[in-house]
RNA sequence: GCGAGGAUGGCGGAAUUUGGCAGACGCGCCAGAUUUAGGAUCUGGUCCCGAAAAGGGAUGGGGGUUCAACUCCCCCUCCUCGCACCA
């Protein structure tokens, strides 16, 4: 079937859109609409999984344009990062060569699809005009105490030879890059951090307002921030040193029989000194810390520990409690030390059984007694406090607060809220990133690079990109040697680069003012467009980027640079596209590729295929069959429009004066119009397209294809089709109006509220809840009238026979149910 | 283990917001038309039992509320995703 010259049409209108700058952002939006699709890491070819994302964004962008909104629909490149650098090492080419090749490839694919971006606002994060503002923002964060350096155990990827943020370590302790997936090690290093924990509570509270986000993402973020309320209780080391310990269960305080310290907590190094246990403790810690994190923290692993030879005093009972080092205690949470309550905490129970530590029962269930020796597991549910001094008899849930008050009054503890969220480690020992704008001077210490010296340029090429366990830039003499801005003496630049998630934390703001040379963006420009009206991207960013960009937006709000506190109200996470059961992937060369697909079937076909197959948030298994239906749909449109003969000169419609058949068509048109618009607004593109298909079938069957109302319907249908199959719609539009501009500069009229329902309606009649007949009544029929017709219906009458009618329920326009006995 | 979401024809999915004709739309399949043939196209049909009509059954399983339940409530099974020794 060669009747539909798909590529010819598509290329024509893609060129037209570009030349006429149809998707250029209006400078002074009156009715703003900001559609943002997460930008891409340009790392190779583009598959249908990518395409799905961009088609969703483009569809809503085009619909809003037709509705008269001033739309901002930008795109850009998340261009710094490891794959470019690894490619550079492998092929010995500068990372920027590889990166710009990839960008060009991606851009070609996006243009093949005809996505309507405003390319004048393109943002590329590896260019100095972008990353200088990463540096500028870093300096502002530094001034506000939100960027700091500390020594800490950090996640180290031995293959990438760099540290990673917590968010970049997978659940099973591997490097987040799927092509690397090397087990992460812990290494003690001095690194730069962003103090996101200062915003932990705000970020948590803010989630409540994000009602347009998927529930799953909100829950994930709540868990990731992980707020817990409790108390820091102060025990005492045998030499008098205070030993604070965090607990959420102070009601079990009388049940403490030991303390446990993390092997990587600072105190662990010194605690066993001068005891006979010193050597064993040292060996134990060394062994545990050498284990890859995956093995060490694997759930269900048997707990291990070692006695330190030291004791602590219980704050209330003054009992002597042995102090252990235990591998299940985390150094990075709380104080790195926990109180062991084997009776009421499962981990402590297992540990106590293994090392023969005493078990005390201090909470009992209301209905039975617990005997320590008979316990097979810890009793963790609420109950009544026992063996707890003056707290005996108190319900444990009430005891929590009473105990905290009691401890606070005596200065033995204080109420505390703890978060699981850690500060964000942003320094990387790699080349291909934003240089950290700091200078290390032997005399003045750490000195920020003055604003007027920005950007600190990344040297465009270096001799050897291969990392050797320390920063690549440290070995680049002409970069690393500089003068101290304070004392003008010789000094060294910070050799690290920033995590690429810094780049993506504010790109949504740069798009609003992409060419600003004085600021990352002008507040008045950002405020014109923020918040993002629809943000579209993958759910894999739930606890990474989607927290970081909220964090940045809040900091920028506090700096007075943006009015909003949250960057986006509505978030759509699109489902993965898989092929033969496996997620499509560029790096694994597994997928259906945009280029060949568009060459064969066309861009409109690709768009409809991904939009029609399933709702956007659902995962999608690609199959060639799903292309058949939409391809047929496009051909049917084409054939219909080619078969209808000349357009009447006047297609004005006076709805009230239409003949019956025409009136029916007009009503169906309005019903379709309403459904398509409302479904698309709700991101139910699959049912919106279904409605268009249904209406096309109506158009096929309509007898008088030369009537004005028919042409009116064809024209409206074209407008409704435009967001979904923009190339074909544009082509058809220009047949109606050869001299006018783009269909996307037109205005989609409102549907006609007065013609949404037919003059008669069909009412199903149930008897005792079972469907027994259907009656046709005028639209305005009252309950009495419907009842009269229903009772006259033959089938209904036979069913009722001589039974008595108990009651009749009528739901206007929906159903009538006759209850008989 | 904790948390979130889900289970509807041979398949992808509608209807769940607001309880009101379950299976829209599409794929596949069947029949007819057209065509030299194939393909394409057009028209119609397509949940199950029942030859058919009548009727009955059916939304993972079991119970409940209701005139009426895919939809609400309780219990169970299974699936997907996230977090996972966070004290």
Image (tube, coloured by chain):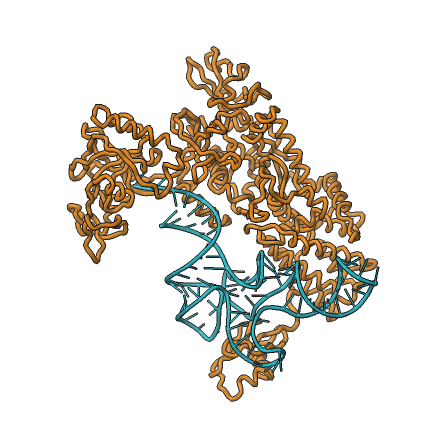
Chain colours: A orange, B cyan
Q: Is residue A533 visible?
A: no
Q: Could you say which is closer to the camera, residue A542 or residue A556?
A: A542
The residue lying at 70 percent from left, 56 percent from top is A633
Q: Could you say which is closer to the camera, residue B5 or residue B44?
A: B44
Seen in the picture, residue A717 relative to A266 is either above or below; the reply is below
Q: Quadrant of residue A655?
A: bottom right
Asked whether, in this view, residue A326 is left or right of residue A568, the answer is left
| Residue lying farthest to the bottom in this orientation | A802
The residue lying at 41 percent from left, 13 percent from top is A443
Asked whether, in this view, residue B80 is left or right of residue A790, the answer is left
Seen in the picture, residue A445 relative to A295 is either above or below; the reply is above
Task: Report x, y in % for residue A495.
Answer: 49, 21
Task: Report x, y in % for residue A497.
Answer: 50, 25
Q: Quadrant of residue A516?
A: top right
The residue lying at 54 percent from left, 19 percent from top is A453
Seen in the picture, residue A518 relative to A220 is either above or below; the reply is above
């Amino acid at each position: 079937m060669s009747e539909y010259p798909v590529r010819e049409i598509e290329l024509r209108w893609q060129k037209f859109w570009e030349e006429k700058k149809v998707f250029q952002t209006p400078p002074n939006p009156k009715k703003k609409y900001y559609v943002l699709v997460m930008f891409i890491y340009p790392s190779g070819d583009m598959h249908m999984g990518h395409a799905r994302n961009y088609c969703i964004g483009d569809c809503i962008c085009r619909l809003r344009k037709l509705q008269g909104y001033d739309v901002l629909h930008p795109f850009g490149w998340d261009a710094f990062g490891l794959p470019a650098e690894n490619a550079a090492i492998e092929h010995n080419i500068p990372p920027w060569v590889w990166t710009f090749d990839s960008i060009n490839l991606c851009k070609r694919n996006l243009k093949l699809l005809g996505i309507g971006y405003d390319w004048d606002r393109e943002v590329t994060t590896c260019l100095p005009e972008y990353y200088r503002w990463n540096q500028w923002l870093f300096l502002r964060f530094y001034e506000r105490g939100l960027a700091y350096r500390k020594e800490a155990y950090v996640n180290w990827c031995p293959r990438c030879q760099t540290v990673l943020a917590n968010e970049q370590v997978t659940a099973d302790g591997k490097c987040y890059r799927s092509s690397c997936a090397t087990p992460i090690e812990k290494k003690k290093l001095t690194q730069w951090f962003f103090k996101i924990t200062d915003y932990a509570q705000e970020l948590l509270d803010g989630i409540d307002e994000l009602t347009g986000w998927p529930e799953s993402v909100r829950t994930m973020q709540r868990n990731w921030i992980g707020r817990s309320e409790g108390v820091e209780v102060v025990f005492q080391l045998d030499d008098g040193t205070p030993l604070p310990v965090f607990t959420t269960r102070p009601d079990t305080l009388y049940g403490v029989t030991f303390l446990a310290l993390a092997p990587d907590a600072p105190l662990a190094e010194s605690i066993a000194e001068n005891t006979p246990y010193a050597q064993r403790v040292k060996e134990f810690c060394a062994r545990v810390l050498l284990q890859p994190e995956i093995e060490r923290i694997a759930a269900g692993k048997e707990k291990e520990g070692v006695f330190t030879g030291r004791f602590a005093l219980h704050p209330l009972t003054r009992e002597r409690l042995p102090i252990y080092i235990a591998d299940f205690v985390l150094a990075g949470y709380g104080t790195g030390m926990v109180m062991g309550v084997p009776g009421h905490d499962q981990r402590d129970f297992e540990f106590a059984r293994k090392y023969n530590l005493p078990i005390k029962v201090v909470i009992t269930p209301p209905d039975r007694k617990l005997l320590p020796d008979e316990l097979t597991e810890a009793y963790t549910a609420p109950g009544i406090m026992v063996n707890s001094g003056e707290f005996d008899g108190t319900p444990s849930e009430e005891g929590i607060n009473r105990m905290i008050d009691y401890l606070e009054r005596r200065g033995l503890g204080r109420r505390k809220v703890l978060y699981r969220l850690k500060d964000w480690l942003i320094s990387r020992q790699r080349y291909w990133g934003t240089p950290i704008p700091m200078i290390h001077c032997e005399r003045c210490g750490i000195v920020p690079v003055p604003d007027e010296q920005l950007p600190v340029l990344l040297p465009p090429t270096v001799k050897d990109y291969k990392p050797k366990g320390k920063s690549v830039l440290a070995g680049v003499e002409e970069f690393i040697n500089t003068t101290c801005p304070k004392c003008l003496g010789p000094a060294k630049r910070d050799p690290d680069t920033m995590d690429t998630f810094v780049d993506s934390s504010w790109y949504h703001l740069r798009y609003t003012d992409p060419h600003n040379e004085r600021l990352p963006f002008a507040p008045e420009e950002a405020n014109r467009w923020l918040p993002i009206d629809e943000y579209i991207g993958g759910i894999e960013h739930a606890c990474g980027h989607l927290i970081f960009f909220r964090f940045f937006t809040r900091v920028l709000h506090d700096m007075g640079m943006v009015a909003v506190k949250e960057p986006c109200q509505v978030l759509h996470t699109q489902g993965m596209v898989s092929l033969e059961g496996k997620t499509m992937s560029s790096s694994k060369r597994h997928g259906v590729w945009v280029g060949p697909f568009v060459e064969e079937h066309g861009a409109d076909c690709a768009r409809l295929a991904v939009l029609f197959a399933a709702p956007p948030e659902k995962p999608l298994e690609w199959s060639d069959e799903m292309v058949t239906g939409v391809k047929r749909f496009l051909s049917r449109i084409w054939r219909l429009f080619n078969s209808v003969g000349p357009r009447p000169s006047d297609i004005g419609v006076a709805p009230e004066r239409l003949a019956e058949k025409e009136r029916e068509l007009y009503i169906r048109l309005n019903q379709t119009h309403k459904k398509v618009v409302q479904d698309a607004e709700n991101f139910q593109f699959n049912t919106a397209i279904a409605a268009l298909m249904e209406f096309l079938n109506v158009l096929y069957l309509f007898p008088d294809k030369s009537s004005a109302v028919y042409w009116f319907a064809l024209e409206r249908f074209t407008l409704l089709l435009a967001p979904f199959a923009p190339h074909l719609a544009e082509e058809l539009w220009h047949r109606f109006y050869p001299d006018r501009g783009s269909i996307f500069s037109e205005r989609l009229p409102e549907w006609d509220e007065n013609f949404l329902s037919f003059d008669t309606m069909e009412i199903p009649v149930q008897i005792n809840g079972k469907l027994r007949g259907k009656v046709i009544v005028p639209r305005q029929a009252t309950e009495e009238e419907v009842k009269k017709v229903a009772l006259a219906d033959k089938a209904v009458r036979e069913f009722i026979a001589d039974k008595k009618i108990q009651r009749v329920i009528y739901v206007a326009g929906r159903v009538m149910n006759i209850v008989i006995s």
